[in-house]
Amino acid sequence: MVKKLGLMILGLATLLGMPAFAQMPEASISSGSGDTHYLARPHIIGGSIWGTDESNGIATASGSTIRRENSDRYTDETNVLDYGAKPSPSFDNTAAFQSAIDAACNKVRKSSGGTYVPQGSDLAGGDVFVPQGTYGLIGPVNWTCAVRLRGAGPGTTKIAWIAGPNRQGILFNMLAPLTDSNRYWYNGAIHDLNIANIGSQPGTMIRIAHCAQCDIYNIMTWGAYRSVVVFAGMFNHIHDFQFQQGHEQVVNGAPNDTETLSTAIEFFGSDNKGAPGCTASDNGNCPTRADGLSIFDGTITAALDGHHEATDCIFVHDFAATMWLKNVACAQTRNGLNVRCDHSTAINNCPQFLDLDRFETETNNTAGTNTTYNLTADNFGHIECRACEFYQSQAGDHNVVLSATRFSAGNFQWFGGKIQKALKSCIVAYASGVQFFGGEILDCGQGRDLSERWGIQFIGSTNNSIIGTQFCHDGVGGTSGTMRPVMIDRGSSYTIVNSDNVHNCAGPSQIFTGPLAKTNSIVNEVGP
């Protein structure tokens, strides 16, 4: 029967003067009461009818009233596979990812007629979807409007940062056109994927610049020199993350500014050294001011090889006005939190308010440089730490160092929590306005220097309070009977030590004699 049908079609074509298998006009097949389905290029071969393209098929979504072409439905979501991406770790998908982002931006511009609502706001591009698979990238991939790059989950969508000419560069560059008085763009995101540095790239995996309300979440990274850098902008978020095996420092004991290449999270701005809108008296209008970064619910770990220093965990420096940090753990890192202000023109352009809540850092000194700190801060406005846990698995010199090398900096407040294990004094305060309320400090001064076996040392500092703090033991079996609680040197003033528990310490707190000694006070100390 099939053979006869084929012969009939051939005979009909011959009578009409048409080639036997020429392209037929568009045909349709109707089935009962169902919708009509269109074949753009129908062919009849051997008695069967088929088409190579049905993208113009029309259907009505269940429960809806408007019939739309399938090609329109396919464009509702931008998928990198539609722009040439291949889920292969050895294939460079940079061009495909960039094309997908550009297409997402152009689609929204076209559909909105280029109208900004409200006037002057961003024209966003929506989601750009990266399906399951492993995608090689050299980068950079640039944001040409506000898009949200999302995967199918960090264990499902993986980005392999492969070696290429983009050395010391950026993989995902989140810098869209600025729309708010040439200061900000809004609402970009990267989420639900994994990024692994398999090409020893020494740059930054994700860089956010001048964004307001950008969001980085449900992200895993592996082997990064810098996982996320936030420059300028305001009210951005990094949360629900795992940054694993951060790359070690290239040089042991790296000097200031060079270790930024090996930091899991970096947050900063710039006052442009007094440029218009960025002066010490008028910094609120500075387009490069960084303000309001929220980091929460995440873990950061470092790579250790016994020869190099591990990566820093979080680095905050110039013109970073406010940062909130909650439920974050740094494991085996070089520094937990590194706060500095090396370049800004005034103290109020330095980090102003850092709020730390349940922040845990465990530093590692396997390289033996002793430059490992749970928290080191120089030239800052205010740092507040609640229920924090600072511990050194291989002890370095100090747990906490508070300095003021350029400006009269200070105001550090500690509430509860525990600080434990250092070769020298656990806390050294050169800055002023240091206050400890409660908490435990123990296992300090484990090195050979007998003069630095203190829980807290005040050196040239003023306006400090240590109240209700427990030294030398933690009540659950941990004691360190060779250390003493608090030392106030002869250059410090207006420092009060009151109602501390120093049971099992080697001796009481001490005020060194000098012209300022009478301004200091140690009272109601219980022990040793």
Image (cartoon, grey):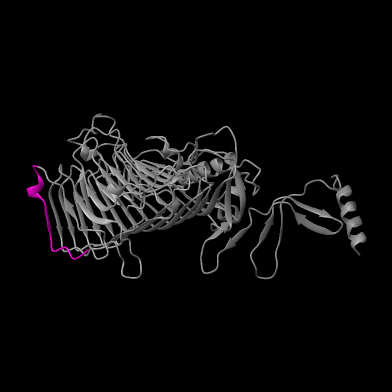
Horizontal arrangement in the rendering, residue 517 relative to residue 177 (left or right)? left
Residue 129 % position (x, y): 54, 52
* Residue 181 seen: yes
Choose between 367 and 318: the one closer to the eye: 367
Query: Is residue 76 in sight in this rendering?
Result: no
How many labels were placed on the picture? 0
Question: For the magenta stretch, what is the residue range?
Answer: 515-528
Q: Position of residue 228 (x, y in %)?
A: 44, 46
Image position, residue 421 (x, y; %): 36, 55
Residue 139: x %, y % from top left: 54, 38
Residue at position x 58%, y 58% in the image: 156
Closer-to-camera residue (212/446): 446
Q: Quadrant of residue 45?
A: bottom right
Going 50% across and 46% down the picture, which residue do you hit? 104
Tell me, yes or no, whether the highlighted magenta stretch contains residue 353: no
Judge by depth and name the residue closer to the eye, 444 or 414: 444
At a point 21% along the width and 38% down the height, the residue shown is 347
Quarter that holds the C terminus = bottom left
Q: Quadrant of the N terminus?
A: bottom right
Left or right: where does residue 204 sit relative to residue 37? left
The reply, left or right, for residue 329 in relation to residue 458 is right
Give the vertical position of 36 relative to 193 (above or below).
Answer: below
Q: Is residue 523 magenta?
A: yes
The answer to which of 257 and 219 lies nearer the viewer is 257
